[in-house]
């Protein structure tokens, strides 16, 4: 499935995030749970310690009470035991009285056994182990073998402790029980016992023996395990473990019992635990351990965790995240959709769009950028519209990059203006089909504008077959006059080049006239707000136009003002023609014919032009006439020849009047 | 003196005669174990009682053995007597004293030994010990008073010398005792000698074969004393601390 919309991507991201958060939560809770289990084990061990002490101390106190009652206050039992003990002492001293005195040890022992059997000792006799031991560990009485006694029990720390007058308790594992010469458990069981030993002291002082009472360790451990979470193990002084359950667990406990950190794995269970030494009164030389199955705890925890409540939460969370996703994506997508529709509008050419940004986020910034872009497009359109006649696209690009250069307000500036007109073309236009006319004109304009573009002219307007263009606006150009003059020469070349094409169409006699002038003019965007043109107006424009017109008078193809020629410097070669006063302008203007580019050697002037012109200026018309008539093919020479003849024919003119020629036509 | 001296003289004769007969000598090494478990040889072994068992013989006649209660103490603390002998308990203090014993050797059938309370100075109460054995004596009023009467089957006994050595019959106190030992040696073929001191962990004993005409080898025995510990109750089996003020007055 491809995720085409923001909404589905967001949903995926949110969903992934939820899953990631859950997984992290599970991992973290696992870790936390392990620490918590360890901490709880440490805490619960105190509880186990208390419970175990309570159990054992309880048994010990009950035993002590009953021992007190049975062996101290029952005069028969106590007295018999005392006599037995004393007699044994006496016997050891060789002073056993075999005569009619006190009964010998064997008799006393029998009496004592009968007495113990007949004495009510509900606490003591109910236990899995009940034995009375005399000094020197002599077994005085045991319920397991009522008929036998007198054997000496193997020495154990608990027995020695009791016979030294202190009570205590210890765990006797199976091995410990089997060390004894007599089977002490009366219930036939073989498992470990928790044995409580209470010394028997006589009213006369001194310890005469001890009572041992044992209860199956497994029962005690089961009781403890019921009261706490986890497994309880007891470890005796020799490192034997006593546990409930299978031998594997017991052996595993034995392996780690001595270690500081209790932790082991056993068949899928992973136990951690803590231990303590309950002391001589509870577990002589031994340790009690509380072990907890981490795996089980984790299993239970996660069973609860993943229970119905979790699924409910997951469902709620899922719905919430879905809703949130939809809301957020809707919120995100709405302005994007608006942008999309507005971009579509822009594509269709409508630049009058504006999207109101909401907030300050990326989308808002994008909206803002979109608005800026549309505004930029509009401005570009505007500039392009304004300068659509600029010939060189580089100029246009520069203007778009620097719109302030096309100051729309208008500006007075020195310009070089060029007017060009096709002479003699209109005469043929009636003979041409309109299509052919348009084709020929377009061919000319195409080449002319290309040439003007190369000379970086600002094309102002086409008027019929005329072209108006200028330089030094809107972009400033130091070489505007030179470019204008050279452009004029280029246009002549275009016309010359097109003669063949035009001749094929039947246009055999045509030429162009070009006027060039450099002077101050106002440039700017002129027109109504909807139809503006970037154009130049002013006296200089008129002069350039007049100069173009004056070409007819002089029979030249170009006519440039002195200002233009001077400003062009050496860029062109020019022939001085005359000083004219144009209509509507009082100042006479010296005019020149452009004869070639400055980079080439100057072409020869017709006849003895300069000499003739100088003679004419001095008023020596007859001499000048002779010289002018030397070049009849030259328009200006012919004009001057006519003037000389007129001056010679007419009355003598006012001094100098011939030097300035008034142009009467426009 | 006269007759009385003669009797004494006659009484000493067999002792002298017996000195030439079979003799039994030996040495008991006494060790004391401290609370810290150290074991040291005692300088003075004169508290060790050496006696022979296996036969009964009456106590020699004469003055009854005496045990005094003086300055709230039984003196002597250990008194060996022969079965059937009566011991005179003399209260030398101007206080009420009592003598009782929880020991079966001192008890009459169904009754423990208890001499009641009596006040000194000079008051004497006599008690006959009819069975062999150790008899622990206490005073029901004064907890610190304790003594032991060792009821032996015959008069063949003595306290060792300071260095632990003993020699029978020289150390025996009476002619009858020497005769009893000699008679026993002649007929028994075996002799069992015990050494014991109050507070000993266990008695030491040696059993020897007796062959006519063969001198008995010197006996070497070892006793180890335990640090004294334990308390005793009063005659009712209750701690002395439960006594009300003025108990025994």
Image (spheres, coloured by chain):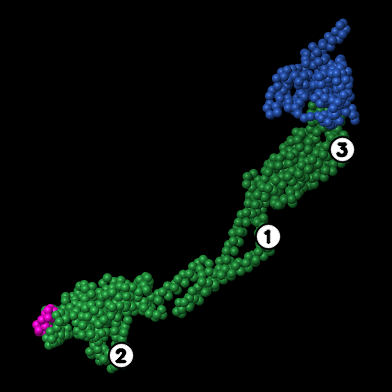
Chain colours: A green, B blue
Q: Tell me the chief SS of the magenta region.
A: helix
Q: Position of residue B42 (x, y in %)?
A: 70, 21
**Which residue matches tag 1?**
A304
- SS type, badge 3: helix
Quadrant housing the C terminus of chain A: bottom left
Residue A590 in view, yes or no: yes
Label 2, residues with CA under 10 Å away: few <14, some 14-19, many ≥20: few
Whichever of labels 3 and 1 marks the residue nearer the N terminus, that label is: 3
Where, quadrant-wise, is the N terminus of chain A in this rendering?
Answer: bottom right
Res B180 seen here: no
The image quarter containing residue A279 is top right
Q: What segment is highlighted magenta in the picture?
A: A613-628
Helix, strand or loop at label 2? It is helix
Q: Which residue is mark 3?
A: A115
Q: Residues within 10 Å of mark 1 (few under 14, many from 20)?
A: few
Q: Are marks 3 and 2 in contact (CB under 8 Å)?
A: no
Between label 3 and label 2, give the one nearer the viewer.
2
Chain at numbered mark 3: A
The image quarter containing residue A67 is top right
């Amino acid at each position: 499935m491809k995720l085409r919309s923001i909404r589905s991507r967001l949903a995926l991201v949110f969903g992934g995030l939820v899953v990631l958060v859950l997984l992290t939560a599970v991992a973290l809770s696992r870790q936390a749970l392990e620490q918590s289990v360890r901490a709880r084990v440490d805490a619960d061990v105190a509880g186990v310690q208390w419970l175990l002490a309570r159990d054992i101390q309880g048994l010990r106190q009950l035993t002590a009470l009953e021992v007190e009652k049975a062996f101290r206050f029952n005069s028969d039992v106590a007295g018999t035991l005392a006599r037995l003990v004393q007699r044994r002492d006496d016997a050891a001293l060789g002073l056993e009285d075999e005569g009619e005195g006190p009964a010998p040890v064997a008799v006393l022992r029998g009496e004592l056994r009968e007495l113990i059997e007949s004495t009510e000792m509900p606490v003591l006799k109910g236990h899995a182990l009940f034995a009375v031991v005399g000094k020197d560990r002599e077994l005085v009485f045991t319920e397991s073998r009522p008929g036998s006694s007198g054997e000496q029990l193997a020495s154990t720390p608990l027995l020695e402790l009791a016979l030294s007058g202190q009570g205590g308790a210890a765990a006797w594992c199976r091995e410990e029980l089997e060390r004894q010469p007599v089977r002490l458990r009366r219930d036939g069981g073989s498992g470990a016992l928790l044995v409580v030993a209470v010394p028997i002291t006589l009213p006369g002082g001194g310890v005469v023996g001890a009572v041992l009472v044992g209860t199956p360790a497994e029962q005690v451990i089961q009781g403890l395990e019921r009261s706490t979470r986890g497994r309880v193990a007891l470890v005796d002084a020799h490192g034997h473990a006593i546990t409930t359950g299978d031998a594997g667990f017991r052996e595993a406990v034995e392996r780690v019992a001595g270690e500081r950190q209790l932790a082991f794995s056993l068949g899928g269970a992973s136990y951690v635990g803590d231990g303590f030494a309950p002391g001589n009164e509870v577990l002589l030389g031994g340790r009690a351990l509380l072990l907890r199955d981490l795996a089980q705890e984790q299993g239970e925890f996660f069973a609860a965790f993943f229970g119905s409540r979790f699924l409910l939460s997951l469902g709620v969370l899922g719905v919430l995240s879905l809703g949130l996703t939809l809301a957020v994506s809707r919120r995100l997508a709405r302005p994007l959709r608006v942008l999309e529709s507005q971009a579509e509008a822009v594509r269709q050419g409508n630049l009058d769009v504006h999207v109101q940004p909401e907030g300050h986020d990326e989308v808002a910034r994008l909206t803002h950028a979109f608005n800026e872009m549309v505004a930029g497009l509009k401005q570009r359109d505007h500039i392009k519209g304004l300068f659509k006649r600029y010939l060189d696209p580089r100029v246009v690009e520069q203007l778009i990059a620097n719109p302030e250069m096309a100051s729309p307000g208008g500006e007075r500036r020195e310009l070089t203006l060029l007017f060009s007109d096709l002479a003699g073309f209109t005469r043929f236009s009636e003979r041409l089909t309109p299509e052919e006319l348009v084709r020929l004109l377009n061919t000319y304009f195409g080449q002319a504008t290309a040439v003007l573009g190369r000379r970086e002219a600002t094309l102002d307007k086409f008027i019929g077959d005329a072209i108006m263009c200028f330089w030094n606006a809107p972009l400033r150009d130091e070489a505007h006059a030179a470019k204008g003059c050279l452009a004029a020469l280029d246009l002549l070349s275009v016309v010359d080049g097109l003669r063949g094409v035009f001749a094929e169409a039947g246009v055999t006699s045509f030429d162009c006239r070009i006027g060039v002038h450099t002077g101050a003019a106002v440039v700017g965007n002129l027109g109504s707000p909807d139809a503006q043109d970037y154009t130049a107006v002013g006296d200089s424009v008129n002069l350039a136009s007049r100069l173009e017109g004056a070409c007819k008078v002089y029979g030249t193809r170009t006519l440039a003002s002195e200002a233009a020629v001077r400003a062009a410097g050496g860029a062109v070669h020019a022939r001085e023609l005359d000083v004219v006063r144009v209509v509507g302008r009082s100042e006479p203007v010296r005019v020149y014919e452009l004869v070639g580019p400055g980079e080439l050697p100057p072409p020869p002037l017709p006849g003895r032009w300069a000499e003739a012109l100088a003679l004419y200026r001095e008023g020596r018309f007859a001499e000048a006439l002779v010289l002018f008539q030397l070049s009849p093919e030259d328009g200006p020479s012919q004009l001057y020849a006519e003037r000389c003849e007129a001056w010679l024919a007419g009355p003598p003119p006012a001094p100098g009047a011939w030097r300035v020629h008034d142009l009467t036509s426009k | 003196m006269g007759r009385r001296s003669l009797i004494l003289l006659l009484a000493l004769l067999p002792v002298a005669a017996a000195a030439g007969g079979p003799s039994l000598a030996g040495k008991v090494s006494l060790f004391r174990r401290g609370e810290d478990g150290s074991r040291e040889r005692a300088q003075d072994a004169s508290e060790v009682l050496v006696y022979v068992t296996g036969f009964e013989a009456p106590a020699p006649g004469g003055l009854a053995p005496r045990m005094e209660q003086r300055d709230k103490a039984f003196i002597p603390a250990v008194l060996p007597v022969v079965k059937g002998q009566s011991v005179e308990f003399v209260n030398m203090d101007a206080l009420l004293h009592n003598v009782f014993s929880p020991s079966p050797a001192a008890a009459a059938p169904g009754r423990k030994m208890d001499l009641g309370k009596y006040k000194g100075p000079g008051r004497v109460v006599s008690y006959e010990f009819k069975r062999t054995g150790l008899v622990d004596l206490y005073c029901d009023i004064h907890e610190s008073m304790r003594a032991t009467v060792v009821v032996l089957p015959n008069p063949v006994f003595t306290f060792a010398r300071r260095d632990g050595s003993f020699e029978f019959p020289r150390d025996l106190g009476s002619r009858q005792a020497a005769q009893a030992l000699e008679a026993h040696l002649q007929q028994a073929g075996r002799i069992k000698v015990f050494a014991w001191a109050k507070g000993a962990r266990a008695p030491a004993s040696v059993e020897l074969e007796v062959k006519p005409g063969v001198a008995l080898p010197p006996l070497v025995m070892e006793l180890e004393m335990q640090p004294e510990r334990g308390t005793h109750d009063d005659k009712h089996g209750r701690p002395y601390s439960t006594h009300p003020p003025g108990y025994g007055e």
